[in-house]
Amino acid sequence: MVNVIMNKFRIRRLPKSVACAAALIALLATAGCWDKTEMSDLAIVSLAGADFDPESQKNIIYYQIVNPSGVAKRRESGPATPFYTFKLEGNEKIGELFTDTTEYIPRKLFTAHYKALIISERLAKRGILESIHWIESLTDRRSSVPVLVSEDPLDQVMNAFTPLERLPGEAIESELFITRNISSAFGRMIRMNNIVKRMDSKRATVVPIVSFVGDPQKAAMMDRLDSVRGNTETIKFDGGAIFVRDRMVGRLNKEETRWYNFLTGQTRVLLLTLPEPPNPIVETVQAKVTRKWTWNEGEPELNIVVRAKLSLRRNTSFIPMSGQTLKKIENQFNKHAKTETMRLIEKWRDKGIDLFGIDEELKAQEGRKWRPYRENDEAWKRIRIRVTVQSQFRQLGNMIRYIEGGTL
Amino acid sequence: MKTVRIGRWQLFLLTANFTIGTTVFVLLGTLIEAGRQDAWLIPLWGGAFGCALAAFWSSLLNRYPGHNIVGVCRIVLGPKIGSAVALMYVWYCVNVASWVTRNLSDFLKMTIMPHTPMHVIHVMFLLVAGYAVVKGIEPIARLMEIFAPIMFLSFWFVLFVAVSPWEWHHFRPVFGTDLRATFLKTVSFLGFPFMQAMVVTFVWPFAGRKAMLPFVGGIAAAAVSLSAIIAFLLGIMGIYRSSHLTFPLFTLAQEVEVGSVLQHLESIMSMIWLLLIFSQLSVSLFGAFEGLREIFRLRTRKPIVAALILIISALAVTIEENIQTNLEWNQKYTFPYFSFLMIVVPLVLYAVGWIKRRTRGKTA
């Protein structure tokens, strides 16, 4: 049969020596075998953490490894926990400490898809250069991973379960990216590569802060997942940590973080209750923040223009609806937004923190007259800032007339 | 016997791919560090120089139709001196092939295959390139013709998908750097990749009479492409980060994230680079082989290519210690080394040829 085929296609039989040599050469084509990876050989890292203990001068790292049988449909037997948290500490540097995993698990760490890196506040304030190098130096880790700062001991945060998502890494990722259209609590520039990109600039990067809520003793127990209480013994987001270069230099509260994310264009959604009666809850459904540098009375001036389309769909206060009232609310919003913007800029500028990248933009200005400002590192602190807010209602929600309560 | 011919479009693609080749991965960080916000200008002036030089080489080769630079050496300087000078070009092709092979293994070991021995990567890739050379320049040119559009589209697709963190202030102030100092710092860039493009002239005898335009056009296209790639890196990653990474383009593709659907596009980048390296390696191997064939009047192909593969695979291991020493060597020696072969010798050939013609004309 073989001979028939060979004759039909005029294939010559190879001499044995040539066939052996060809087979050996073909073996070389399996070069990938040196780097072959079996799924069952991998320990898939879902979340990583880094900490530093100033007393013992030890680096501490955490990583959560996915337990496939725990993530899959629950079985009658076998471990049901969806992940295991490993804690390693020592005087070694972070890069060396991570290789100590081999002392605990018989698998290769797979870090290509971990969802977030949580850094303790004390390490963040000390500087995260080592963590940056750890992520940037090997190509199997991505620097596009979100960075979070934990204000509670990392031990609690890394050992906490999360409701709905069985893996905290997945829960954090969903929280950060799915809720972006609903709330302005998280911006887009919260990744490690955003911090690295600004390493030669004064411009700050704001990343989310996480904390632990509940009883730390109960946190690591699987039973917690059977409790109906959703927001206890879990992790919670609260405000933002300000990084300038590789160090955390301050923190924004929840309100400031929302304004920061809105004003830097990282989110278009901003929900706020206006301070003046009838105290409506106004939401921006579309917004554009532009900055323009002008030259005014011999001095440079930064013009921040906020253009927003407003909505009342989340409003729960009574409003006597009329075109005039809506115009009044628009004006209230404009005034409030202007005050908040100026307050936020001036507060952090006074502290010497360039939250909005004013220095970076000033240094990018072209022309000879800008030269003294470009060359002066302190010039951004003296720049005059003008804020203009323009808003207009576009969506009013499902209530064209609000219901008047109280006694008749 | 069938006459081997490659088309003008094929020559254009071969030249462009050869020039972009390893540059696109090895040199971008260094260029951005040197030129900062104006780094995108460096390939443009490098390309202008490369085009001028390519026009000069073309006019030299067009004086001796049907010959490559080795043939020209032998015609102008005589069989003995000419062959000795021509051997330098053969050596240069071997040298380029070794660099390219080493760049490839450096990249693969750093990114995708850290445990695979370097020698295996060298030999495997050289075997493929060697096989292509044995089959002649036509299959190599056809391969480029088939793959170039796919490479072009997928490469720019990855860059456009990654564009969301773009910031214009990374380019400003435009011309804000000391351009003279930047030029002096990046003189080596004129050598690698633009002077190196001379290796492509080994295909000249197969490219017909009107080869100058696609050749110069290929260099110009490569320069514009490199400039655009640098602009993308600057806009997306910024000066600081892109100049601190060994393979910024790979990292850029790795960090692409369009929702949870489109992620980790670095494999596309790696495949494109493997194809670019294939074009560079096969053309330089072809150059070395053609040079030897012409000098020694060889009739067989396979043993010569096999010997070249052995030499190049060994040389690739010793040609540099690591990518850092390679970059430093490139910075210091590329321009003088390449200038001798690409400017001085062709000028001498031009002058001697001109004198010879005049003398012959007078005698006649």
Image (cartoon, coloured by chain):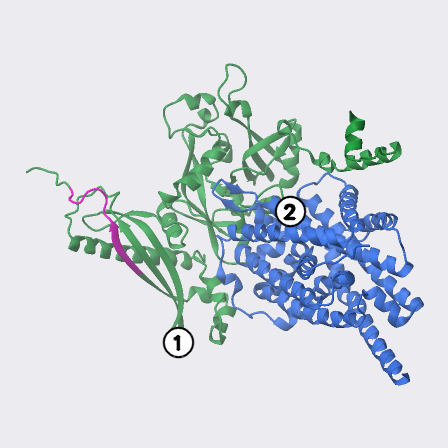
Chain colours: A green, B blue
Q: Is A289 above or below relative to A215?
A: below
Q: Kindly identify which chain the residue marked by label 2 belongs to.
A: B
Q: Tell me which amino acid carries mark 1.
A: Gly
Residue on which the image places disc 1: A298
Which residue is tagged 2? B270
> In this rendering, which labeled residue sits more in front, label 1 or label 2?
2
Q: Quadrant of the N terminus of chain B?
A: bottom right
Residue at the image position 60 percent from the left and 48 percent from the top:
B251
In this view of the protein, can residue A196 be seen by the observer? no
Is residue A185 magenta-colored? no
- SS for dot 1: loop
Q: Position of residue B96 (x, y in %)?
A: 78, 57
Q: For this view, does A186 lie left or right of residue A53?
A: left
Instruction: Place residue A323 in its image quadrant.
Output: bottom left
For the residues labelled 1 and 2, the Cα–Cα distance comes to: 53 Å
| Kind of residue at disc 2 | Ser
Q: Is mark 2 on a helix, strand or loop?
A: helix
Q: Residue furthest left?
A: A408
